């Protein structure tokens, strides 16, 4: 498959034309890895799914000398029962995630990203788990590191449908209480909830020693508010409807929305939580690069 065609599969709108979610995940990761080789990030060790880099104190008898001969670097043979880390993907499936101004919805993008991350985790022998939530935890699949586990995760993603209203903060607290072993927590959500509650839940993970990466997923219209004409705004969770001319409220909306974003970003920085704002039109490799930057700081 030509490189340009592979890279096209990083485009979320192209992915939406493929019905099989597992195939989407595979195409995204293959396109992503192909792009890494010609990018500033080519040093990331995604190729060695059965090896990890040698660390001082490791036994020399586990060094793979064939890999050393090819790469001039020391890698340790990693056996199937060994795992680098435990990763937990928390995907928001509340009704607000079904919004789309054009192209694909936030929940569709979230599923693509969750599937691609799961594929990449398992390729690197990382134990991977999944939590689907709205106002409560709707499905929890505990982490495992066997390749066959991907189909279980994909099936849960495919079967999930937009749920009820959002209670991000309460769900984060509930998951922080449930997860005892330290790991990498990845939250994929539009974070349309009280920001103080969200930050409180994120802090709970940090207090438990977890590393946290937040993908704040938004539709571009939620940020720029480029609506025109007489419009009825429909709250997908409360069912409330308001008819208005967007011109009259655009300035105040954008001011309030920017204050909200500034608060979330500032609190994440202060609590050493990695945060990335992603729009549904964004190529998926942007999020995967953010994950690899995070992961390579942990190993």
Image (tube, rainbow, N blue to C red):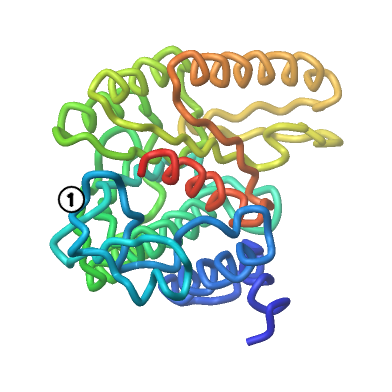
Q: Quadrant of residue 76?
A: bottom left
Q: Nearer the viewer, residue 215 or 181?
A: 181
Q: Residue at x 27, y 54 (%)?
A: 128
**Quadrant location of the C terminus?**
top left
How many numbered marks does the figure carry? Answer: 1
User: From what the image shows, is residue 97 above or below residue 175?
Assistant: below
Q: Residue at x 39, y 67 (%)?
A: 48
* Outermost residue to the bottom: 1
Q: Nearer the viewer, residue 7 or 142?
A: 7
Q: Residue at x 58, y 45 (%)?
A: 99
Q: Residue at x 43, y 39 (%)?
A: 297
Crowd band around label 1 with a 10 angstrom C-alpha radius: few (<14), some (14–19), many (20+):
some
User: From what the image shows, is residue 145 above or below residue 89?
Assistant: below
Task: Determine which residue is flagged by label 1.
Answer: 142
Q: Secondary structure at mark 1?
A: strand
User: From what the image shows, is residue 224 above or below residue 117?
Assistant: above
Q: Quadrant of residue 6?
A: bottom right
Query: In the image, 175: left or right of 201?
Result: left
Pinpoint residue 167: horizontal percent, then vertical percent: 36, 27
Pinpoint residue 216: horizontal percent, then vertical percent: 54, 36
Q: Nearer the viewer, residue 251 or 297?
A: 297
Query: In the image, 114: left or right of 244?
Result: left
**Quadrant location of the N terminus?**
bottom right
Pinpoint residue 8: horizontal percent, then vertical percent: 68, 71
């Amino acid at each position: 498959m030509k490189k340009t065609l592979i890279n096209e599969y990083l485009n979320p709108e192209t992915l939406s034309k493929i019905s099989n979610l597992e195939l989407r995940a595979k195409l995204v990761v293959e396109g992503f890895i192909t792009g890494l080789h010609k990018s500033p990030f080519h040093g990331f060790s995604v190729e060695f799914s059965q090896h990890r880099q040698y660390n001082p104190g490791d036994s020399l008898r586990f060094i793979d000398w064939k890999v050393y001969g090819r790469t001039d670097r020391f890698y340790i043979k990693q056996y199937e029962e060994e795992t680098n880390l435990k990763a937990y993907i928390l995907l928001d499936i509340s009704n607000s995630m079904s919004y789309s101004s054009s192209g694909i919805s936030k929940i569709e993008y979230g599923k693509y990203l969750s599937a691609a991350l799961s594929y990449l985790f398992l390729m690197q022998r990382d134990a991977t788990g999944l939590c689907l939530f709205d106002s409560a935890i709707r499905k929890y699949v505990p982490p495992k590191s066997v390749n066959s586990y991907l189909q279980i995760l994909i099936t849960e993603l495919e079967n999930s449908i937009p749920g009820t209203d959002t209670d991000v903060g309460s769900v984060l607290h509930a998951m922080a209480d449930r997860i005892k072993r330290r790991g990498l927590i990845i939250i994929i959500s539009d974070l349309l909830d009280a920001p103080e509650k969200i930050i409180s839940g994120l802090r709970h993970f940090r207090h438990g020693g977890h590393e946290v990466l937040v993908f704040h997923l938004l539709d571009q219209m939620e940020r720029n508010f480029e609506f025109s004409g007489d419009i009825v705004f429909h709250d997908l969770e409360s069912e409330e409807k308001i008819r208005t001319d967007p011109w009259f409220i655009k300035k105040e909306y954008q001011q309030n929305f920017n204050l909200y974003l500034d608060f979330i970003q500032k609190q994440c920085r202060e609590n050493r939580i990695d945060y990335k704002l992603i729009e549904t039109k964004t190529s998926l490799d942007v999020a995967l690069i953010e994950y690899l930057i995070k992961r390579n700081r942990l190993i």
